[in-house]
């Protein structure tokens, strides 16, 4: 759930265009009732939509209320649903799923089988979802009724009205019942409502009323039903005032900022033979710096394994593009450097996993953050040949083939290739060309699933028996295997900046600043602390950046607002990843802009201030 939310939300079933509750009559709790914002370094890293993406600070999966407190049309739908739940009360809670009503036919797209609930005391509710965009009609037990597009009325069928002071039976009502009193029924609909009471049929227009069998029938539009507050015994309804929605404000451009001359301090975190996890250094939200020197003579590549979340790596003064591989191994080209060089890696935590996904190391629940391990690649050997084949009539002794090269007509049947691998140092086996997940077993260990997202297997120094089991895919691209001999980069000095340190520095201001007119051009790896005069607003601000190849963290009101990444970046999920939200009454704005390597020049051109409806 978001840390800042204009109202409460919950995780459950959403009623929009989904029909009745189906197999659950006990709980109706739509998700997402209200969107919100995760301030600070608190979003997650996860697998929303695909393995490996960042949750945006704006948490918005189509909530009834936007992240900035603006009601969407679904908000009124939810209010109508709440009235439906209230009016049916215990009867809805005690209802049981009923057999589909075979006497319902529609001239519009709908669900393949109408859902129904049998009510205690007699009668049922039949859901008739209209999944199209054009007006339509449904035939319910021989009665033709209008159904509004995009709606799903819970039609009452054969319901006794004794609880509401009438001896009549509601044979059919083609709209949602939203209120009832002795002898009065109120319906919500944006098309005329057909009601059959004790065999007498009538049609009530929207915003109209009528009386049948001594029962007063009232039809409200869905917009008015959402505002229904009370009902009198004579059929008079009382509505709340129409909600006032904020107007979309014209954006204001900010073209001048004050740049601080100083940078945020670091806290030393000791010397370490190998890079420690940030959590072991006391940083659960924030970032840390890892620094060392090493000899890269005759080294063409480095291999980074287990790093998360964002690694800004500088080797011999050259800043590389950010690495956000969620723990997967990444090769880094260092052919342009030689001799003893300085290495610095600044690792920032975006968030931790809130769903377990085995495909990437950092997506496992409990996975830690930090640099992981950095290795020098000493040499690379092609080990694609000399694999023995087991399965598919391979025979004994086992024939020898290239990896994935056995000929068989048994497509997709599992096949195992085995080979002895001599690793003179700690090594990495790279399986290039993986299409489907496969299983790798080293010596007598447990099989490991290897995916296209991370096609690497780390090996200790020594001689190993490696077995690869995969579905036979004769028309696939084929597999190649490389063995990389590794040597760990050692002797690291560490320094950290947790979220509290950074927030305190942002709030404290600076003794010396100079005014800078935008655009502000940065070098890759360069950082700039910027202060913006931002008066408090009763409505709040949405702050957007016109920028390329920068990652910006924002603070206001003594809180970290979140981060925006402009330019080439990983996938994001959730809400709007390109804006900061400054809540009402919060004043001042401080930004930490970081230039990042990639296509284009790191540059902040303009800040745009908008309102909550922007």
Image: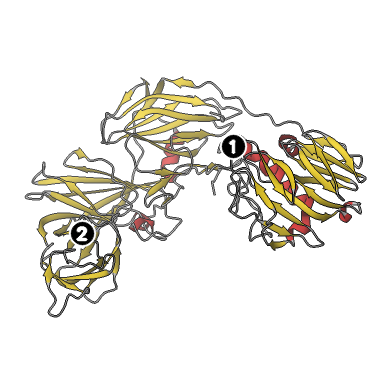
**Relative to residue 331, is residue 460 depicted above or below?**
below
| Residue at the image point whose x is 7% and y is 49% from the top | 297
Report the number of discs: 2
Question: In the image, 196: left or right of 130?
Answer: right
- Across and down, in percent, residue 393 comes to 20, 76
Question: In the image, 135: left or right of 250?
Answer: right
Viewer-proximal residue among 412 and 593: 412
Viewer-proximal residue among 177 and 613: 177
Q: Residues within 10 Å of mark 2 (few under 14, many from 20)?
A: many
Q: Which label sits in the foreground, 1 or 2? A: 1
Q: Secondary structure at mark 2?
A: strand
Residue under label 2:
431
| Residue at the image point whose x is 13% and y is 64% from the top | 402
- Across and down, in percent, residue 383 comes to 12, 62
Q: Secondary structure at mark 1?
A: loop
| Residue at the image point whose x is 89% and y is 52% from the top | 168
Q: Is residue 128 visible?
A: no
Q: Residues within 10 Å of mark 1 (few under 14, many from 20)?
A: few
**Relative to residue 155, is residue 462 depicted above or below?**
below
The color scheme shown is secondary structure
- Across and down, in percent, residue 435 comes to 27, 56
Question: In the image, 209: left or right of 404?
Answer: right
Quarter of the view holding residue 598: top left
| Residue 197: numbered disc | none
Residue under label 1:
133
Q: Is residue 5 visible?
A: yes
Query: Real-space Cα distance between discs 1 and 2?
Result: 49 Å
| Residue farthest along the bottom direction in this orientation | 396
- Across and down, in percent, residue 430 comes to 19, 58
| Residue at the image point whose x is 81% and y is 37% from the top | 204
Question: In the image, 493: left or right of 316?
Answer: right
């Amino acid at each position: 759930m978001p840390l800042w939310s204009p109202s409460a939300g919950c995780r459950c079933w959403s009623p929009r265009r989904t029909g009745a509750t189906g197999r659950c009559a006990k709980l109706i709790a739509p998700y997402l009732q209200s969107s919100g914002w995760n301030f600070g370094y608190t979003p997650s890293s996860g697998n929303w939509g695909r393995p490996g993406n960042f949750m945006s600070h704006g948490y918005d999966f189509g909530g009834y209320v936007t992240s900035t407190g603006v009601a969407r049309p679904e908000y009124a739908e939810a209010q109508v649903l709440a009235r439906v739940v209230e009016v049916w009360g215990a009867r809805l809670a005690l209802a049981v799923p009923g057999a589909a009503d075979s006497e319902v036919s529609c001239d519009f797209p709908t669900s393949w089988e109408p859902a129904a609930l049998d009510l205690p005391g007699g009668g049922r509710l039949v859901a008739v979802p209209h999944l199209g965009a054009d007006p339509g009609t449904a035939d319910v037990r021989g009665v033709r009724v209008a159904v509004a597009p995009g709606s799903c009325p819970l039609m009452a069928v054969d319901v006794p009205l004794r609880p509401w002071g009438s001896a009549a039976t509601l044979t059919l009502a083609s709209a949602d019942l939203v209120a009832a009193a002795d002898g009065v029924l109120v319906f919500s609909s944006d098309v005329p409502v057909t009601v059959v009471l004790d065999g007498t049929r009538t049609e009530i227009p929207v915003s109209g009323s009528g009386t049948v069998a001594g029962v007063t029938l009232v039809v409200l539009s869905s917009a008015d039903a959402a505002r229904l507050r009370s009902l009198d015994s004579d059929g008079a309804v009382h509505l709340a005032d129409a909600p006032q929605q904020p107007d979309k404000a014209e954006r204001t451009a900010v073209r001048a900022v004050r740049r601080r001359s100083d940078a945020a301090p670091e806290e030393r975190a000791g010397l370490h033979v190998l890079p420690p996890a940030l959590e072991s250094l006391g940083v659960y939200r924030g970032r840390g710096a890892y620094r060392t020197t090493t000899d890269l003579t005759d080294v063409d590549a480095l291999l980074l394994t287990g790093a998360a979340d964002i690694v800004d790596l500088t080797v011999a003064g050259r800043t590389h593009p950010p690495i956000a591989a969620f723990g997967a191994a990444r090769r880094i080209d260092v052919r342009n450097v030689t001799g003893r060089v300085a290495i610095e890696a600044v690792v920032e935590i975006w968030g931790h996993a809130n769903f377990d996904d085995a495909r990437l190391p950092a997506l496992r629940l409990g996975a830690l953050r930090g640099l992981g391990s950095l290795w020098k690649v000493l040499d690379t050997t092609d080990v694609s040949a000399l694999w023995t084949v087991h399965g598919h009539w391979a025979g004994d002794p086992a024939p020898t083939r290239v990896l994935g090269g056995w000929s068989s007509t048994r497509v997709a049947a599992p096949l195992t290739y085995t080979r002895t691998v001599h690793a003179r140092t700690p090594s990495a086996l790279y399986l290039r060309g993986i299409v489907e997940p496969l299983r790798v077993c080293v010596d007598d260990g447990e099989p490991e699933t290897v995916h296209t997202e991370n096609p690497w297997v780390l090996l200790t120094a020594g001689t190993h028996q490696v077995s690869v089991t995969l579905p036979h895919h004769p028309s696939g691209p084929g597999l190649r295997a490389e063995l990389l001999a590794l040597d760990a980069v050692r002797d690291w000095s560490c320094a950290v900046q947790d979220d509290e340190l950074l927030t305190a520095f942002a709030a404290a201001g600076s003794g010396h600043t100079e005014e800078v007119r935008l655009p502000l051009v940065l070098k890759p790896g360069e950082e700039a602390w910027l202060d913006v005069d931002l008066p408090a607003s009763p409505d709040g601000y949405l702050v957007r950046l016109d920028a390329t190849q920068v990652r910006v963290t924002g603070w206001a009101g003594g809180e970290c607002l979140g981060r925006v990444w402009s330019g080439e970046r990983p996938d994001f999920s959730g809400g709007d990843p390109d804006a900061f939200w400054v809540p009402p009454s919060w004043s001042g704005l401080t930004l930490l802009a970081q230039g990042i390597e990639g296509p284009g020049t790191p540059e902040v051109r303009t800040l745009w201030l908008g309102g909550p409806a922007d």
